[in-house]
Image (spheres, rainbow, N blue to C red):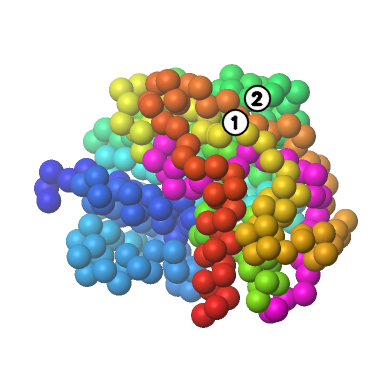
């Protein structure tokens, strides 16, 4: 046990945090996660791990903390002494960031600065993964985007992530911190939050097929994204921190699909015509919409040997089938 690598995860109760907390113990890690006291009701994604006596309290440990509370964060770092930090926490819903811009920027931007400062003071070497986002590119005219594409965010969330991404680069270059930016494009799974459009679509398709709902109301159906599988993307996070050199990596499939295509694929799983059930509500449209977000992941494929698995259709099917199981319960 003493030879186990120790990882600390912020945002462990989220989609990515839950998959990462499954991945790392299998690689011999002791995993520590930071949770807010108010998240007691939101830990369903890791509940199966908390109930496993072979894992919880042996390979997985949770600590109360808040990203705005530097004193508690420093205490956790002192007690845990992590070799790797995976910083995943923060308000990550782009549309919601227009409603709560200040808290979004505090959580995605200033919290990252706070963690970088704490990491700089650690006596032991520490490798840091920072969850950046394709939203930093926003309205760029370059497509596909690479690690050197200029940032041009179109939302408060994108602005906060651009700030945090640049900070990570500054701390890497100025202080020699081992910090990697994972510039992840949209990645989905059955564990996606219910307020995200992909989960909303999968949920509605399943419930409509079972007669539990009548329709699905969405915003811009022509909005396009590069969608991949969350399970693959957390593997990419881990690979970044195993490399000899800290760097930034775009993690993407390189394929772009519209919300309309996602809807059609989801309703195809349940053999229903999507046009009969889908309604458009302009109030759901974002004030500003990124136009051409699609990633070039050549660098991580060549340097770290990472590649996405499965197809777009398989991802949609996986999400809808999970919702069907839930509906039938």
Q: Is residue 324 shown above or below 311?
A: below
Q: Along the line of sight, which residue is nearer the eye, 64 or 90?
A: 90
Measuring 79% from the left and 50% from the top, which residue is drawn there?
221
Q: Is residue 202 left or right of residue 169?
A: right
Along the viewing direction, whichever of 153 and 312 lies nearer the viewer: 312
Residue 281: quadrant of the picture: bottom right
**Whether residue 222 is situated above or below residue 266 in the rendered picture:** above
Distance from label 2 to label 1 (Cα)?
7 Å
Write down the residue under mark 1.
Answer: 254
Q: Which residues are magenta?
A: 211-236
Q: Nearer the viewer, mark 2 or mark 1?
A: 1
Q: Are the residues at dot 2 and dot 1 in contact (C-beta closer than 8 Å)? A: yes
Where does residue 143 sit, x and y in percent of width and height? 69, 24
Q: Is residue 220 left or right of residue 112?
A: right
The residue at the point 63 percent across, 46 percent down is 105
Residue drawn at (57%, 56%), measured in percent from left and top? 317
Q: Is residue 101 left or right of residue 10?
A: right
Which residue, given by chain and number where applicable, does mark 2 sit on? 144
Residue 247 to residue 18: above or below: above
Crowd tier of the residue under label 1, counting other residues whose Cα lies within 10 Å: few below 14, some 14–19, many 20 or above: many
Q: Is residue 196 left or right of residue 220?
A: left
Membership of 222 in magenta stretch: yes
Find the residue positioned furthest to the left.
Answer: 2
Structural crowding at the residue carrying mark 2, measured as other residues with C-alpha within 10 Å and reported as few (<14), some (14–19) or many (≥20): some
Seen in the picture, residue 3 relative to 325 is either above or below; the reply is above
Q: Secondary structure at mark 2?
A: loop
């Amino acid at each position: 046990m003493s030879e186990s690598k120790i990882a600390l995860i912020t945002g462990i109760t989220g989609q990515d945090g839950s998959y990462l907390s499954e991945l790392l113990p299998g690689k011999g890690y002791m995993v520590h996660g930071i949770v807010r006291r108010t998240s007691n009701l939101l830990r369903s994604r890791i509940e199966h791990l908390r109930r496993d006596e072979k894992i919880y309290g042996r390979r997985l440990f949770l600590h109360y903390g808040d990203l705005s509370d530097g004193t508690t964060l420093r205490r956790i770092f002192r007690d845990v002494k992590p070799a790797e930090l995976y910083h995943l926490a923060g308000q990550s819903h782009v549309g919601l960031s227009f409603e709560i811009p200040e808290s979004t920027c505090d959580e995605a931007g200033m919290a990252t600065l706070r963690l970088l400062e704490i990491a700089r003071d650690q006596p032991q070497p520490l490798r840091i993964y920072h969850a950046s986002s394709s939203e930093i590119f926003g309205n760029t005219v370059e497509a596909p985007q690479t690690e050197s594409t200029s940032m041009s965010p179109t939302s408060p969330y994108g602005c906060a992530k651009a700030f945090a991404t640049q900070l990570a680069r500054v701390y890497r270059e100025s202080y020699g911190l081992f910090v990697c930016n994972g510039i992840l494009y949209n990645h989905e799974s059955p564990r996606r939050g219910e307020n995200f459009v992909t989960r909303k679509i999968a949920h509605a398709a399943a419930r409509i097929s079972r007669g539990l709902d009548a329709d699905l109301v969405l915003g811009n159906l022509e909005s396009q994204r590069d969608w991949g599988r969350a399970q693959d993307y957390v593997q990419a996070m881990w690979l970044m921190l195993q490399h000899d050199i800290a760097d930034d990596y775009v993690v993407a499939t390189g394929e772009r699909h519209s919300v309309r295509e996602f809807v059609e694929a989801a309703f195809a799983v349940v053999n229903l015509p999507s046009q009969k059930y889908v309604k458009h509500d302009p109030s759901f449209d974002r004030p500003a919409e990124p136009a051409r977000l699609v990633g070039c992941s050549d660098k991580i494929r060549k340097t770290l040997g990472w590649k996405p698995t499965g197809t777009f259709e398989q991802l949609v099917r996986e999400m809808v089938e999970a919702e069907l199981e839930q509906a039938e319960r």
